[in-house]
Image (spheres, grey):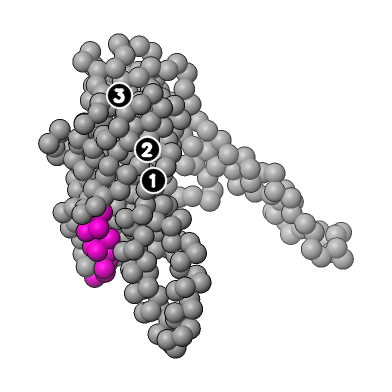
Amino acid sequence: MKRFLLYVALLLGSLIAQAQPAVEFHDVTAAITDSVRIVPNFSLGDTRSYRATVKTEISEARSDSSSVDYHMKVESVDPDHYGLLLTLDNFDHNPSRFPDTGKLIECCGTEGFHFFFNRHSLKVDSIDCSNLVKPLKEFLIKVSSGINQALDEDSTQLFIDNELDSGINEMAKKLLEETIQTWADQYGRTYAMGGSRWIETDEDFETIEVEDIDATNEDEELPEGEDEDMPDLSSKEVHQAFAHINEDGTFFYREKISWESVMLDNWFEVQEASFDANGWPIEITSTITMGETNISIHWQLINEND
């Protein structure tokens, strides 16, 4: 099931984003200052449409591309939350790579789903996934029937009743959270104006204790050239960013994160985004490279208040 969620989430444009710790907070409507924090300032009835495109390249072996249109509408505004409706359509994909997934997109395009964005935590608080439960269940039944062809009819039905129904609501919620993650993860980011650079170090691996399995060989000398100490398995994230806010409140940032570790080779992520004065994205580009694999997600504004 986790593989399925990842597979659809990448398809719809999700990607885990990194956030920079704040020094001084200002929203995108503020005047030019030392730093800027990206926050929404939506109005009731605001609508935005985006074309989200996902491209995956694995060396020269494979290249896939898919796209879908996101339509977002602000249905309610109060001091604590924005209530939004999201619908999806114009799903363009390779059927051989993503079979039957179009039915899920059609459901979201027909009825959509509602979610609430917390204005204080800048996170999605709740999602109404009831519209997706039935088509998601039908999709998973079809997938499971292909996987479990050796099972008899009674066994298959037992699997559906006991295993699928018990977690279908939570699965639908997770899927929808992943669907809007690229958009939602922009909010709360804080950047210094102009260029900046900082390093985050993960030293968790250095504290790992290695148990001596063979106590009888305690006194055995290590071969020449081998160190008794653990190798340095720590990782280091090097962040390089540039941010600019215009006098009209529009904002742009670019951030590159490079992972430096003996465990990782050629791993880096590049994020670029621009926003209007009310915090709506104009364009978001996210590219992550993991060795010979490259995944890019691009959100482009195609309609405003349509």
First in residue order: circle 1 vs circle 2: 2
Residue bearing the label numbered 1? 127
Give me the disc on residue 41: 3
- Closer to us: 22 or 292: 22
Gap between marks 3 and 1, in whole Å?
A: 20 Å
Gap between marks 2 and 3, in whole Å?
A: 14 Å
In x, y percent, where is residue 228?
Answer: 74, 51
Amino acid type assigned to the residue bearing label 3 in the image: Asn
First in residue order: circle 3 vs circle 1: 3
First in residue order: circle 2 vs circle 3: 3
Amino acid type assigned to the residue bearing label 1 in the image: Ile
Tell me what residue is drawn at x 46 percent, y 30 percent.
121
Q: Quadrant of residue 137?
A: bottom left
Packing grade of label 1 (10 A; few <14, some 14-19, many >=20) is some
For the record, the magenta segment spans 96-108
- Closer to us: 251 or 151: 151
In x, y percent, where is residue 113?
Answer: 30, 48
